[in-house]
Amino acid sequence: MELDFSLKHWNILKDDKTGISTISGKYELLMNGKAIAGQEFNTSYNGTPIAFSGDLIQKIKSLEQEVIAEITKMLS
């Protein structure tokens, strides 16, 4: 039996109370291309808390800025 891990979506959330950014989203486990389990992380009441390093969050924020710059350039 082979399982695959799929990151369905993710985003950067900033906690309103602390101002600290974290990564949130949803992942799924797939068997033969079909989802058999999934879990949200760092969101909602039933989400699993997952700590991400500050370095990774900074890299993703940098990438997010590159995406914004690319879209802005395209729309100019």
Image (spheres, helix red, strand yellow):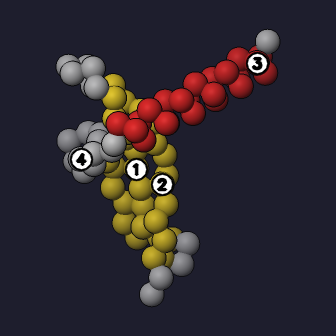
- The residue identified by callout 2 is 7
Q: Where is residue 60 in the image (x, y as percent from the top left)?
A: 49, 36
Task: For marks 1 and 3, give the one nearer the viewer.
Answer: 3
Farthest-out residue, top: 76
Q: In which quarter of the image is residue 18?
A: top left
Q: Is mark 2 on a helix, strand or loop?
A: strand
Q: On residue 73, which mark appears?
A: 3
Foreground pick, 22 / 3: 22
Q: What residue type is labelled 1?
A: Lys
Q: Where is residue 11 in the image (x, y as percent from the top left)?
A: 45, 36
Q: What residue type is labelled 4?
A: Pro
**Whether residue 47 can be seen here:** no
Q: Which amino acid does label 3 sit on?
A: Lys
Q: Where is residue 12 in the image (x, y as percent from the top left)?
A: 42, 32
Q: What residue type is labelled 2?
A: Leu
Foreground pick, 57 / 76: 57
Whether tag 2 and tag 1 are in contact, CB under 8 A, the answer is yes
Q: Where is residue 53 in the image (x, y as percent from the top left)?
A: 33, 42
Tell me the distance, in whole angstroms, between the alpha carbons under discs 4 and 3: 36 Å
Q: What residue is drawn where x is 46% and y is 65%?
A: 5
Q: What residue is drawn where x is 57% and y is 33%?
A: 63
- The residue identified by callout 1 is 26
- The residue identified by callout 4 is 49
Q: What element carries label 4?
A: loop
Whether tag 4 and tag 3 are in contact, CB under 8 A, the answer is no
